[in-house]
């Protein structure tokens, strides 16, 4: 069994930003030499998400508006008594999910026609990491 | 390490349909010969979900009503400017999750007493796939 | 490839309880001897969740209040016609997610600075299990 581990770093200009990372994940898989296996892609910070969905700006806008509705910012969250102001970012990332497993078949990401891997930042403007861990043969 | 990959195809009659797939996943695991490992079950289309929960029609009705409330259809989503009309399906599948890992112990799916694997279709009436990828020994 | 499987048992005093389990997961990984791989941590009951987020009481309070708002208890759910009264627990656990994969690097859980693994019980006061399955080398 082979394993390869890499860390993708992000430092977004805006507090909230959605970034397509399919190509970076594919590059780690290519480097690993794994032909059959899985790649775990997981946010290492608890106000960011990793998810799979469409690469279409309108839909990304819809996701953001929807998350703001279901997990609004600017509320009087208990977490803010610690001095933080990002409780909504914890909730939003929970709705989107913080990790995905991408299957690897014949040395490639085995994704459907519209599947793209995204990093969703909800409390950016600082350096944050995503782990990509490949396991297989 | 052994790996086995199969694709389950679905073409639902209704736009939204929830289908129990535990037995199909178990069949792939049996065929793989893996005794200890994991089975990834992942929707390859971005308007469908794979989740684990109860095989009880009332609860499935509750899930559907609840998803319609949290991610309603028929709204003026930005995604629809592309000609699509299924933005709510992308949101609903995000709430349910698009993949699960089923542990395999002693050659069987290691599920709790009420755990069942479901495929949840939110934009059906066309051929769509789920990947089942088994890894282990 | 090595695999190790253990089951964590819970029997909470309250119906809803959030319990940090990072140390128990780390103990299973240490015992497994796996240096590079992944640990699946998955609730085996369908009214409980496993998630990764902050170990901060205020935020846990926020999660609970937010889940109650999005998936309220005490409603006239169809599932309750079976004699159950816990449909909201099924919905809440779906929002939080029922499993996580923790990467293992150099023999340790490869977690970001604030990542903690939690068990979230939404229908407790009875014995329930979480599987921890470690795979790697």
Image: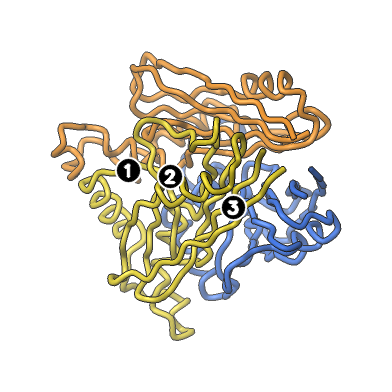
Chain colours: A orange, B blue, C yellow
* Residue B11 appears in view: yes
Image side of residue C79 versus residue A102, left or right: left
Q: Secondary structure at mark 2?
A: helix
**In terms of depth relative to the viewer, which is nearer, B46 or C29?**
C29
In this rendering, the answer to whether A85 lies above or below B71 is above
Q: Which residue is mark 2?
A: A95
In this rendering, the answer to whether B21 lies above or below A16 is below
Residue B115, given in percent of the width and then of the height, sits at: 59, 67
* Residue B85 appears in view: no
**In terms of depth relative to the viewer, which is nearer, A130 or A18?**
A130
- Say if labels 2 and 1 share a chain: yes
Q: Which residue is mark 3?
A: C133
Q: CA distance from mark 3 to mark 2?
A: 25 Å
Q: Which residue is mark 1?
A: A71
Residue A27, given in percent of the width and then of the height, sits at: 68, 18
Picture mark count = 3
Q: Decide: marks 1, 3 in contact (CB < 8 A)?
A: no
At a point 46% along the width and 76% down the height, the residue shown is C78
């Amino acid at each position: 069994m082979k394993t390869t581990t890499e860390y993708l770093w992000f430092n977004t200009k805006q507090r909230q930003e959605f970034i397509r990372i399919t190509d970076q994940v594919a590059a780690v898989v290519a480097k690993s030499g794994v032909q059959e296996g899985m790649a775990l892609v997981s946010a290492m910070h608890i106000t960011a998400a990793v998810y799979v969905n469409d690469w279409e700006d309108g839909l990304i806008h819809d996701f953001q508006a929807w998350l703001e509705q279901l997990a609004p910012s600017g509320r009087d969250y208990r977490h803010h008594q610690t001095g933080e102001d990002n409780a909504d970012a914890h909730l939003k990332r929970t709705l989107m999910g913080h990790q995905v497993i991408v299957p690897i078949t014949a040395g490639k990401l085995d994704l459907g026609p519209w599947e793209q891997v995204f990093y969703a930042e909800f409390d950016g403007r600082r350096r944050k990491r995503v782990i990509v861990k490949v396991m297989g043969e």
